[in-house]
Amino acid sequence: MNAEQNALGRVLLISKTVYSAISEGEITLNVPALLDSLSAVLSHLNDEKQPIAKLLRRLKTEIKSKNGAFYPTVKQYFSKIYPVLEYDFVKAAKHVPAIIYGNDKICAQFVAGDRSRVKAMCEAMKSYPGFLFGEFEALSDKQFYDLVFGYYPKLYENEDFMGEMKGLFTENAKEK
């Protein structure tokens, strides 16, 4: 695993923990800033000048400064001795824009003050890194999407949280 693959794996683990903490109400301050920090780092995937691997220290500093009480929860993921699970880097890289998109949608709902939608969105998003790590390998990509993101329009009057990203889960996907 090269440095960029390792760094993306770490950011995915941090993201999963962040989504869980937001959905459980453990993080209530600076939520948009935290999600924006994650998105900013993810947007540098495979960037030759500033790859994710070089931005982990900045992410660590931002988490400490914006959510100091939360930092101990993710501290282990910044340690070089913490092993990152093997995963399909190409598939994960393909899904990075959807994670950034999801973060933006969560931020918009947070700023609008709709905490129930934020919780529902984070509940769905916390499964996304696991999907990329292969935790849902018994499901096709489409089945994962339908299971995790497909319920959202039913809860919120046909408002589709990740509908614009559905193509990532159906292109070249074969049903299992």
Image: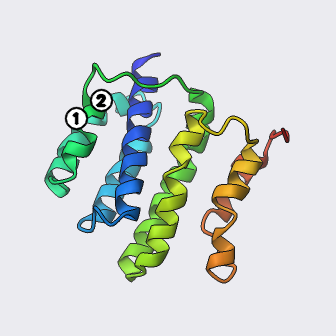
> x and y percent of residue 53 in the render?
34, 28
Up-down: is 87 above or below 18? above
Q: Which mark is residue 54?
A: 2
Up-down: is 155 above or below 25? below
Q: Residue at x 67, y 74 (%)?
A: 153
- Determine the secondary structure under disc 1: helix
Decide if residue 65 is on the left or right side of residue 73: left
- Determine the secondary structure under disc 2: helix
Q: Residue at x 36, y 52 (%)?
A: 18
Based on the displayed image, in which of its 4 quarters is residue 84 positioned? top left
Up-down: is 104 above or below 71? below
Based on the displayed image, in which of its 4 quarters is residue 93 positioned? top right
Q: For mark 1, what is the residue?
A: 57
- Amino acid at the residue labelled 1: Arg
Decide if residue 1 is on the left or right side of residue 59: right
> x and y percent of residue 57 in the render?
22, 35
> x and y percent of residue 36 in the render?
35, 57
In this orientation, which residue lies closer to the viewer: 115 or 33? 115
Res. 121 in view: yes
In 3D space, how far apart are the residues under numbered discs 1 and 2 (Cα atoms)?
7 Å
- Amino acid at the residue labelled 2: Lys
In this orientation, which residue lies closer to the viewer: 139 or 43? 139
Q: Residue at x 48, y 52 (%)?
A: 126
Based on the displayed image, in which of its 4 quarters is residue 149 positioned? bottom right
Residues marked 1 and 2 touching at CB (< 8 Å): yes
> x and y percent of residue 31 in the render?
31, 64
Decide if residue 87 is on the left or right side of residue 147: left
In this orientation, which residue lies closer to the viewer: 89 or 157? 157
